[in-house]
């Protein structure tokens, strides 16, 4: 029987298992036997990339678990979303303050030497938080314990630094790598809340936080063990701080405002679901927003970028601000989780392209030898924004209503757009 001819139909996006991790398959049309491997397959053809990606995914999954777990755990124990939001905001704010120093140490001494002890110390803070909640310790101990988790290293930034080291000077490969990393972030924030809500509901309230701590420590150990792809440390550098680099301030402020979108959306959605008697479904509803962003990020990375990145960034922020009105409308007009779910899915589709383009600009404008610090500053801005958004979202939920709370992410996205406008004029 003659061999079957290849289909002349474009391949659909697939995930294939290759070696030791999941690899995103080609998104480009492929015809016949002469087709070339797609951008993601080419990306993971570099030796060592699959192993460090597997470890990094394990380490990043808890990032989508901790906030949801803490809110469910504290609100369930103390009966206050305002307290839960304030504790989470304090921990994130502490991380935002400490993370650049951790990143600077990583740039100077190497990822493995710094990330492992920093993660171990943060794990102690996570354990302390669960014990304080479980045994009814005073409220101030919750703030102190969560502050101790501030040494959590920016695993996403370390992974992006490895890609930048492996593909230095190849803008197309870096665009694909940044898109994959953003999709990985969204995948973790998609699965994390679901896993956290399930563990807290099916086992005990502290289960989500404890499991997240174990996964984080295991992932960092696996990631740090992959020394062949680790960028060399820059023990001495005369480069100025990334904060003072040309064009960086408006980008960092934009990440701050974007983080406020994420933080407020998370707290408000949990409260919205709880008010309707479906708290356990909050993680799944939030996962839809991350799913939209994950899919959009993979598709965006498969395309060759055109035009100036600064203008693309402003356009992405504008689309994000427009789509974030959908959850507000769904909550106001329908008032049900069934209507909110697709609205969050659509709203999430503009998130990844915004983050990918913004991170590419951060990498371009960060001085040589301080790349991990520059990317961590962007993540620090996000964390600071998440902290502010969580606090403001929790306040609006308790003082006004959970429906009105969806106005907070809309306001934050509009502010991000206003901040982004000068970026288009600062092409550099």
Image (cartoon, helix red, strand yellow):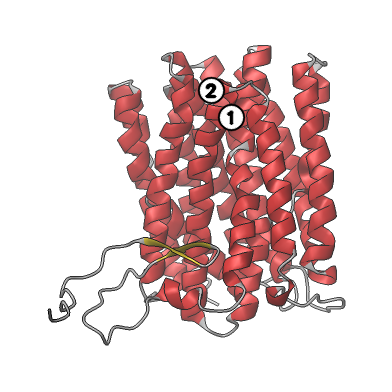
The answer to whether any part of residue 348 appears in the image is yes
Residue at disc 2, secondary structure: helix
Q: Foreground residue, 386 or 170?
A: 170
Residue at disc 1, secondary structure: helix
Q: Quadrant of the C terminus?
A: bottom right
Q: What count of labels does the image hold? A: 2
- What residue sits right under mark 2 in the picture? 396
Residue 320, percent across and down? 40, 49
Residue that lies at the very extreme toward the front in this rendered image: 1
Residue 360, percent across and down? 54, 69
In the displayed structure, 40 sits above or below 123; it is: below
Bin the neighbour count of mark 2 within 10 Å (Cα to Cα): few under 14, some 14-19, many 20 and up.
many
Residue 419 placement, left or right of 52: left
Bin the neighbour count of mark 1 within 10 Å (Cα to Cα): few under 14, some 14-19, many 20 and up.
many
The answer to whether any part of residue 405 appears in the image is no
Instruction: Name which quarter of the figure residue 311 lies in.
Output: bottom left
Residue 48, percent across and down? 62, 74
Residue 336, percent across and down? 33, 21
Mark 1 vs 2: CB contact within 8 A: yes
Residue 333 placement, left or right of 383: left
Q: Foreground residue, 313 or 298?
A: 298
Q: Foreground residue, 305 or 419?
A: 305
Q: CA distance from mark 1 to mark 2?
A: 6 Å
Residue 105 circle label: none
Residue 101 placement, left or right of 359: right
In the displayed structure, 218 sits above or below 10; it is: above
State the residue at coordinates (25%, 77%): 30
State the residue at coordinates (52%, 20%): 397
In the displayed structure, 209 sits above or below 357; it is: above
Instruction: Name which quarter of the figure residue 160 lies in.
Output: bottom right
- What residue sits right under mark 1 in the picture? 392
State the residue at coordinates (63%, 65%): 52
């Amino acid at each position: 029987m003659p061999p079957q001819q290849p289909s002349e139909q474009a391949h659909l996006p697939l995930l294939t298992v290759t070696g030791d991790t999941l690899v995103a398959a080609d998104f480009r049309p492929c015809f016949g036997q002469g087709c070339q491997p797609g951008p993601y397959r080419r990306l993971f053809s570099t030796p060592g990339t699959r192993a460090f990606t597997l470890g990094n995914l394990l380490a990043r999954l808890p990032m989508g678990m901790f906030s949801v777990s803490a809110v469910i755990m504290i609100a369930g124990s103390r009966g206050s979303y305002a307290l839960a939001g304030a504790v989470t905001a304090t921990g994130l704010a502490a991380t935002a303050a400490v993370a650049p120093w951790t990143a600077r140490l990583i740039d100077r001494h190497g990822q493995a030497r710094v990330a492992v002890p920093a993660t171990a110390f943060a794990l102690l803070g996570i354990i302390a938080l669960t014990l304080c909640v479980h045994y009814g310790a005073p409220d101030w101990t919750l703030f102190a314990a969560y502050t101790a988790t501030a040494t959590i290293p920016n695993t996403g930034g370390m992974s992006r630094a490895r890609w930048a080291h492996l593909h230095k000077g190849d803008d197309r490969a870096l665009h694909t790598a940044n898109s994959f990393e953003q999709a990985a972030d969204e995948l973790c924030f998609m699965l994390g809340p679901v896993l956290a809500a399930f563990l807290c509901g099916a086992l005990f309230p502290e289960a989500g936080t404890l499991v997240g701590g174990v996964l984080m420590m295991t992932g960092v150990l696996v990631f740090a063990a992959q020394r062949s792809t680790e960028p060399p440390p820059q023990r001495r550098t005369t480069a100025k701080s990334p904060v003072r680099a040309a064009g960086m301030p408006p980008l960092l402020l934009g990440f701050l405002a974007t983080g406020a979108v994420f933080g407020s959306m998370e707290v408000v959605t949990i409260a919205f679901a709880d008010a309707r008697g479906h708290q356990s479904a909050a993680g799944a509803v939030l996962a839809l927003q991350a799913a939209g962003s994950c899919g959009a990020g993979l598709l965006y990375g498969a395309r060759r970028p055109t035009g100036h990145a600064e203008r693309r960034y402003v356009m992405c922020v504008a689309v994000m601000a427009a789509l974030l009105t959908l959850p507000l409308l769904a909550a106001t007009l329908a008032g049900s989780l069934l209507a909110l779910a697709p609205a969050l899915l659509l709203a999430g589709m503009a998130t990844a392209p915004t983050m990918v383009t913004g991170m590419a600009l951060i990498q371009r404008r960060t001085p040589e030898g301080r790349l991990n610090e520059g990317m961590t500053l962007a993540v620090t801005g996000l964390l600071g924004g998440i902290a502010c958004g969580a606090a403001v979202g929790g306040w609006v939920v308790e003082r006004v209503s959970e429906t009105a709370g969806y106005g907070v992410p809309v306001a934050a996205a509009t502010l991000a757009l206003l901040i982004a406008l000068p970026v288009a004029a600062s092409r550099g």
